[in-house]
Image (cartoon, grey):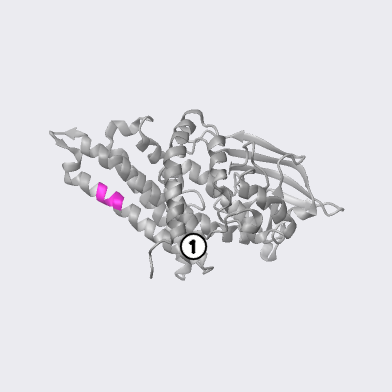
Amino acid sequence: MDFSLSEEQAELRRMVHDFARGEVAPAQEQMDRDHDFPYETWEKWSNLGMPGILIPQDYGGSGLDSLTYILAMEEMGAVSQTFALIWQVHVMVANMYVHLGTPEQKAEWLPRFASGQNLGAFALTESGAGSDAGGVRTRAVQDIKGNWILNGNKIFISNAGTRISDGTVVMAATGEQEGRRKAISCFIVPTGTPGYSLGQSFDKMAWHGMDNSELVFNDCLLPATSILGKEGQGLRQALAGLNLGRIVFGTLGGALAQACLEETLPYTKERKQFGKSLSDFQITQAKLANMATNAETTRAFARYVAWLHSQGQDCHTEAAMVKLMGTKLAVESATDAYQLHGGYGFMHDYRVNRLYREAQILAIGEGTNEIQQMLIARALGC
């Protein structure tokens, strides 16, 4: 197997590496202070064509593959998990339009997503529906004209409340299937639609700068053409789209482990205890070795699963595995980095404090790690 990168992939990695450290790193510090969405940085990112990385060129995108996307995500995630996840949600939603949209829906929305003019958001989670996606209570019913009337609430929805958010994909129950299971459908809800409003925003322990909002639908009137994909197939469609998201979360876990190493190695060399550098102690060396191994192992596995995805091969189980492994190792690495920084790790002024907080949510997003274990066990025949 050839593990070398193409010239295009290597150049893209260098570009993202430089942009992340030159533009996103200071933006991340600003996000940590004011919790505002990084509009200026997003505009510069858009000028590089990165919001449309997976969108076909016919719609203004770059038309690149999943592996190249993951390579770029490695570089971004090592600098800013927040900006990486803003981008990830946007790419996931745009990809849903690519694979599920009608020609009219693609023509209307994909150029806007590709340019970064509009930011994509995906609304599944409710107070009683997260890991149990089938527990969605938001409902859509058709009136006599064939229009859909949407009612319900969504919470913790990333990217939905910015001034450039639009074309949000919302999952709602539209009836019942065999066995009295809910039929779930995906709807395109443009910003400004009557009956659609933002509720509360949430004060999070990390991801400051990424918008996470409550969405409220009160007799929200949508045309019959607002369904994305097939009616009643929304849950299957969304879960298929989550494969790439899970590969990204695994990748971000490896990137976070790499960031922990980059923060902790120089610190332990400079920090003196008992007349020696912390890095001289074997227990410190063991933790640093684990961080390096965690980062490299996750990186290699994520690239392999991304390659499977780019080849159109079934990778449901592998995506669950890399998400589970990468995020668990991220938590381990962040905990060790935090511990080695001692009291300084407890201070917000130190980056390791943010890495420790960010690691915790990786084990929850894109399906909790317990859900990933369940999926893997099913694949084993349990």
Q: Is residue 379 left or right of residue 135?
A: left
Q: Quadrant of residue 250?
A: bottom left
Point out the image quarter for the N terminus.
Answer: bottom left
Q: In this rendering, does residue 242 appear at all?
A: yes
Residue at 32% x, 39% y: name it.
338
Q: Residue 71: image x %, image y %?
A: 44, 55
Q: As displayed, is residue 244 above or below residue 18?
A: below
Q: Quadrant of residue 300?
A: bottom left
Q: Residue 42: image x %, image y %?
A: 55, 40
Q: Residue 230: image x %, image y %?
A: 70, 62
Residue at 28% x, 51% y: name it.
290
Q: As displayed, is residue 116 above or below residue 374?
A: above
Query: Is residue 219 one of those drawn in magenta?
Result: no
Q: Quadrant of residue 107?
A: bottom right
Q: In this rendering, does residue 38 appear at all?
A: no
Q: Residue 315: image x %, image y %?
A: 49, 66
| Residue at the limit of the structure toward the right, as seen here | 144
Residue at 61% x, 53% y: name it.
94
Q: Nearer the viewer, residue 382 or 196?
A: 196
Residue at 76% x, 43% y: name it.
220
For disc 1, the marked residue is 375
| Magenta part, dominant SS | helix
Q: Is residue 10 left or right of residue 309?
A: left
Query: Is residue 289 one of those drawn in magenta?
Result: yes
Q: What is the crowding at mark 1: few (fewer than 14 residues within 10 Å), some, or many (at least 20)? A: some
Q: Which residues are magenta?
A: 288-292
User: Element at badge 1?
Assistant: helix
Q: Nearer the viewer, residue 165 or 206?
A: 165
The amino acid beneath tag 1 is Leu
Give the number of marks: 1
